[in-house]
Structures are given as structure tokens and as C-alpha cells.
């Protein structure tokens, strides 16, 4: 009789311990899931902003290309006619400073007889026009990858929450059964679910602020 009493007390204490661990774990996983989902939302918004910036940079690059093309055509005409005053006027008053190094190199190659057929086909020049677009696109891709990562971590915390909820259920219903063997089996199932959840939590990162995840968001 005394053995049965201590056995009952042991099962009750074990159930309370498992309930406590599962409850705290569930709350922790729920918090982390919410934080990571928040990180994902912020990163998605930042990704959209980066995509928009890339579109603006692309439009600006196209406008610069058209503008430079018109001036280069005028400059080439002035070079062919030997009009140095027009060349100087175009360089000093109308041309973008970023264009001048390419134009000077093109003119030097022209004088040496090794000029490229078209300055607008210069790979370095084209790259300078697309630099803003390329940078914004790369940043958007990186942010999108971080958003997917944050979402995946949040989903992993949700799965872990489900495991802990099952553990809570098993530990919580033990008082509804009189047979010690059945109660012990339920508590064992609860302990296994908690152990599985603990193994998952070991590999899951703890939520950080978005600026810590992606430093350039704070810039």
C-alpha cells in the first residue's frame, strides 16, 4: 500500500515537472516564432524597398545612357570637324563628370588609331551605368534570402511548439487514468516529445534584431 502511495506521488511529481517544462518551452517557442516572423516581415519590406531602388537605378541608367549618347554624338562630330571650342564646351558644361574619363580614353585611342568602334559599347562604361542597379539587386537578393531563412526558422519553432503541445497533452491527461502503467506510458510519451523538442531547439538560433541580422538595414 505504501509502495502504491509513493508510486502515485512519483507519477504526480513527474507529471508536474513535465507540465512545467513543456509549458515554459511552449511559451519560449511561441515567442521566438513571433520574433522570427517579425524579422521576416521587416526583411520582406526591406527587400521590396531594395527592388524599388533597383528599378529606379535602372531607369536612371537608361536616362544617363540616352543623355550621354546624344552628347557623345555631338562630341564626335566636333572631333571630326576639328572644332576644339565645341569639344571644350561639351566637356566642361554638358557632360557628366563620370563620362569624361571614358571619353578621354576613347579620344586618346582614336588619336593612336586604336579607338573602339563605339564608346557606348565599352564594358567598363556600361558597368558604371548599371552599378547602382546591380548593387540594389544584389542587396534585394540577399535580403530575400534572409527573409526566407527567418521564415524557415519561425516555422521550425512552430513545429517545436506542436511537439511541446503534445507533451503537455500527454502529461495533462495522466490524472484522468487510474492505471499506473498507462499513466507512466503517457508520461514517457510526454518526456519523449520534450526530448525531441529539446534536440530541435539546440540547433535553432535565437531571434536577434533585424539590424544585427543584416547590418546594412541600419545604414
Image: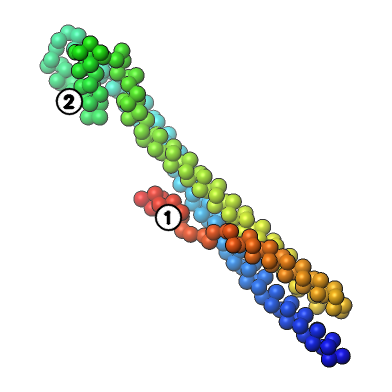
Residue at 19% over, 9% down: 80
Tag count: 2
Question: Horizontally, is 183 left or right of 161 in the view?
Answer: right
**Is 158 on the left-hand or right-hand side of 183?**
left
Q: Nearer the observer, disc 1 or disc 2?
A: 1
CA neighbours of label 1 inside 10 A, class few (<14), some (14 to 19), many (20+): few
Q: Residue furthest left?
A: 85
Q: Residue furthest bottom?
A: 2
Residue 74 in sight in this render? no
Q: Is residue 204 visible?
A: yes
Specify whether 201 is left or right of 172: left
The residue pinned by badge 2 equals 93
Quadrant that contains the N terminus: bottom right
Classed neighbour count for the residue bearing mark 2: other residues with Cα under 10 Å, few (<14), some (14–19), many (≥20): few
Q: Position of residue 120 (x, y in %)?
A: 32, 19
Residue shown at the point (44%, 51%) measured from the top left: 214
**Residue 11's quadrant in the figure?**
bottom right
Residue that badge 1 annotates = 211
Q: Secondary structure at mark 1?
A: helix
* 120 w.r.t. 12: above or below: above
Provide the secondary structure element on which disc 2 rests: helix
Question: Is residue 70 placed above or below 196 in the rendered structure?
Answer: above
Query: Marks 2 and 1: in contact by CB < 8 Å?
Result: no
Name the image quarter holding residue 205.
bottom right
Image coordinates of residue 29 in percent, x first then y, are 61, 63
Residue 115 in the image, given as x and y percentages of width and height: 26, 14
Residue 12 drawn at (x, y percent)? 76, 81
Q: How is the image coloured?
A: rainbow
N-terminal of the pair, mark 1 or mark 2, is 2
Distance (Cα) linking label 1 and label 2? 43 Å
- Which of the 4 image quadrants contains residue 118? top left
Amino acid at each position: 500500500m505504501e509502495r502504491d502511495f509513493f508510486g502515485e506521488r512519483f507519477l504526480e511529481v513527474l507529471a508536474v515537472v513535465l507540465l512545467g517544462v513543456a509549458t515554459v518551452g511552449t511559451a519560449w517557442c511561441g515567442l521566438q516564432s513571433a520574433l522570427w516572423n517579425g524579422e521576416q516581415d521587416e526583411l520582406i519590406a526591406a527587400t521590396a524597398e531594395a527592388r524599388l531602388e533597383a528599378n529606379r537605378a535602372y531607369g536612371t541608367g537608361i536616362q544617363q545612357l540616352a543623355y550621354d549618347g546624344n552628347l557623345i554624338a555631338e562630341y564626335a562630330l566636333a572631333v571630326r570637324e576639328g572644332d576644339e571650342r565645341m569639344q571644350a564646351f561639351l566637356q566642361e558644361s554638358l557632360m557628366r563628370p563620370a563620362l569624361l574619363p571614358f571619353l578621354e580614353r576613347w579620344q586618346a585611342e582614336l588619336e593612336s588609331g586604336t579607338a573602339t568602334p563605339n564608346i557606348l559599347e565599352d564594358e567598363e562604361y556600361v558597368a558604371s551605368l548599371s552599378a547602382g542597379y546591380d548593387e540594389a539587386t544584389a542587396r534585394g537578393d540577399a535580403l530575400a534570402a534572409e527573409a526566407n531563412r527567418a521564415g524557415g526558422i519561425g516555422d521550425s519553432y512552430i513545429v517545436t511548439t506542436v511537439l511541446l503541445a503534445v507533451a503537455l497533452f500527454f502529461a495533462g491527461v495522466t490524472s484522468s487514468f487510474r492505471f499506473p502503467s498507462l499513466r507512466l506510458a503517457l508520461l514517457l510519451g510526454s518526456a519523449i516529445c520534450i526530448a525531441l523538442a529539446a534536440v530541435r531547439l539546440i540547433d535553432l538560433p535565437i531571434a536577434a534584431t533585424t539590424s544585427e541580422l543584416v547590418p546594412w538595414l541600419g545604414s
